[in-house]
Image: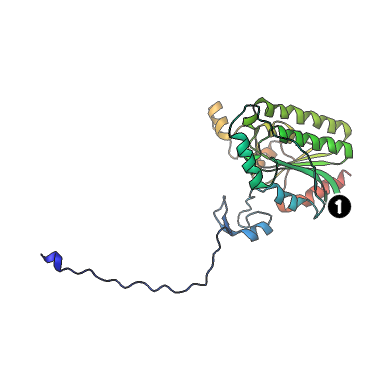
Amino acid sequence: MVIDKIKKRNMPKPEIKDSKVDIPVGKWVKCNNCGEILYKEFLHENYSVCPNCNYHFRLSSRRRIWQIIDDGTFEPFDLKIATVNPLNMDDYMVKLKGLKERTGIDDAVVCGTGNINGDKVVLCVMDGNFLMGSMGTVVGEKITFSMEKALELKLPIIIFSVSGGARMQEGIMSLMQMAKTTAVVNKLNEAGILYISVLTDPTYGGVTASFASVADIILAEPSAMIGFAGPRVIKQTIGQELPEGFQTAEFQLEHGFVDKIVDRKQMKETLSKILKFHK
């Protein structure tokens, strides 16, 4: 048959030349806003802010403290608080153990004292890498302890919030933290202790509805999403179109919920000026 006489054509293999281009894995990150590919080390040096569109990447508590507190001055509170499992969820404690090993922190907030341009403060920094910064019993107790420590030491307190809300794995126990933390804020007010709340992306749920929104001064990072329920839930509930930019920091500033939007590069200096003004 004719087909048997057709020989397979041997195509020459392309010559592969040695390339000196080396692109290490994990060294680059894509901006969630503009899509720009950024070198991680450069991004970290730029305060984790995209140089192309000013998008503020989310920060770990460790990096946030490094940006805000003077070198070598942060002293964390040594609190031995065990997480409760009131609903007896089988995988909850296993998940917490894995998160502690991966993040290097005990729960979704890191608290302690440190200096900002020489002025000592009590600082709490929530970490979205730990169950999206959800507030359970440990977070609520740490925030409460820090406020009481500010009262004892007569120091200003600054809280950086990032949270998806109350921790559903702890049921009603997590909701009780809203009342507990807000009650201590009243003690701060009575004692004349300065309390500054900094809202970062995103700050939602029980955190927004408690200590994060009752400070003397409320700052926010650019374009941070701030609210109680998410825009999609609200839209479905009320059956209406929401205003453009709803729940962004800029929207909240326009409607009086936020006092000032501060770029991350200016955050330390802004906090320092406020502290010195109220000293």
Front one among 261 and 124:
124
Q: Which residue is mark 1?
A: 118
Q: Residue at x 75, y 36 (%)?
A: 81
Q: Is residue 178 visible?
A: yes
Instruction: Say above or below: 261 vs 71.
Output: above
In depth, the one of 89 and 123 nearer the eye is 89
Residue type at numbered disc 1: Gly
**271 relative to 13, above or below:** above
- Quarter residue 211 falls in: top right
Tell me if I can see residue 224 in this picture.
no
- Which one is in front, 50 or 239? 50
Is 212 left, or right, of 97 in this rendering? right
Estimate the x, y position of residue 248 in percent, counting from the top left.
63, 40
Q: Which residue is located at x 68 percent, y 47 percent? A: 104
Decide if residue 135 is on the left or right side of residue 5: right
Q: Relative to residue 98, is residue 50 depicted above or below?
A: below
Quadrant in which the N terminus is drawn: bottom left
User: Where is 105 relative to 50, above or below?
Assistant: above
Residue 2 place in picture, x, y as percent? 11, 66
Q: Residue 249 at what x, y percent from top left? A: 66, 41
Q: Quadrant of the C terminus?
A: top right
Q: Position of residue 205 (x, y in %)?
A: 65, 32
Helix, strand, or loop for circle 1? Answer: loop
Is residue 252 left or right of 188 when viewed as pictured? left
Indicate the colouring scheme: rainbow
Which residue appears farthest toward the left when viewing the image?
1
Q: Nearer the viewer, residue 144 or 188?
A: 144
Count residues near mark 1 (Cα–Cα under 10 Å), then give few for <14, some for 14-19, many for 20+: few
Q: Looking at the image, which residue is at 83% across and 53% down?
A: 117
Q: What residue occupies the far top of the structure in this picture?
A: 172
